[in-house]
Image (tube, coloured by chain):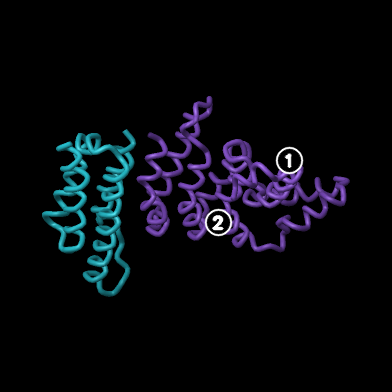
Amino acid sequence: MFKKFEKEVPQAIKTKIRAVTDTFYKQDRVENKDDENKEDEKKDESTVEDKLIQSFMNNSESDDIEVVKQMWAFNMPCIVLINGKREYWTSKISALFMTLMKDEMVSVRISLSAGLLEVTKLLNLGADLPDSKQLQQQMLEIANHFMNDEQSKVRLAFLPKLCDFVALFN
Amino acid sequence: MLLHTLIKERLTALDDFSNYTFTGKNKKTEKSEVEREAGKIKSDLIEKLFKMFPVQQLVDSDFHLYLFKFIKEDQNIATRKKMSKVLGESVIVALIK
């Protein structure tokens, strides 16, 4: 199904999906930089289309940030898959992931831990690219972080997939 | 290399309950439940390991000792049976070939 998506969906729609995702995943929300951003948004003269995207996926201050974070964590593999996998991970999602994996909410960490294998598969670590080693190192650090998590549920979400994870590095 | 650092470390950690805080009223029951759960995860992990990686590499890294330990010491008959099957199918047959 995803191959069909990659081949048949026009670039314009993919760009829109990327814009919607960028609006949904905001690093600023977890770093509490909302106020500065809001001022910037007010100054912007956005088009109608941009405003529609904003109203569709924008995380407003009234949204419960804990629920938003859970949604972020749960949908992470899907978002990486839809938006160009490796490139999107490096440019945007990586930093957010690193922040979320240290989140105090256990459910967020469980979702991330459970989805780590899928995300790693999408990054195609075996490919002969300049940043492959760096990415491998990063994924190993993340895996180690989850396996040493103080909550057993977080550890157990990843542990059964450990063999598959290691196989991706061979 | 990763087999050693990641998987072996995890398999060893599953045996170690020194850092585990038992919170229930009946600590003995809770401990046996946790041990049973850890044993199940460990046996599943080992079974998968022998299916996914080259046996020669695993045997060189002494992973077969985990199989021996299960067969010798585990209290659950089903687990002993499962581990014996893995030993026969994945290790012995592969090494004879």
Q: Which residue matches tag 1?
A: A11
Colour given to chain A in the rendered image: purple
Residue B62 x, y percent position in the rendering: 19, 39
Cα–Cα span, label 1 and label 2: 26 Å
Residue A78 x, y percent position in the rendering: 58, 50
Decide: few, some or many residues near mark 1? Use Cα within 10 Å; few <14, some 14-19, many ≥20: few
Q: Chain letter for cyan? A: B
- Which type of secondary structure does the marked residue at label 1 adopt? helix
Q: Amino acid at mark 1?
A: Gln
Identify which residue is drawn at 24% across, 38% down: B55
Indicate which disc, 1 or 2, sits on the residue closer to the N terminus: 1
Residue A130 x, y percent position in the rendering: 53, 25
Q: Could you tell me which chain the residue with mark 1 belongs to?
A: A
Q: Which residue matches tag 2?
A: A74
Identify which residue is drawn at 46% across, 32% down: A126
Identify which residue is drawn at 78% across, 50% down: A38
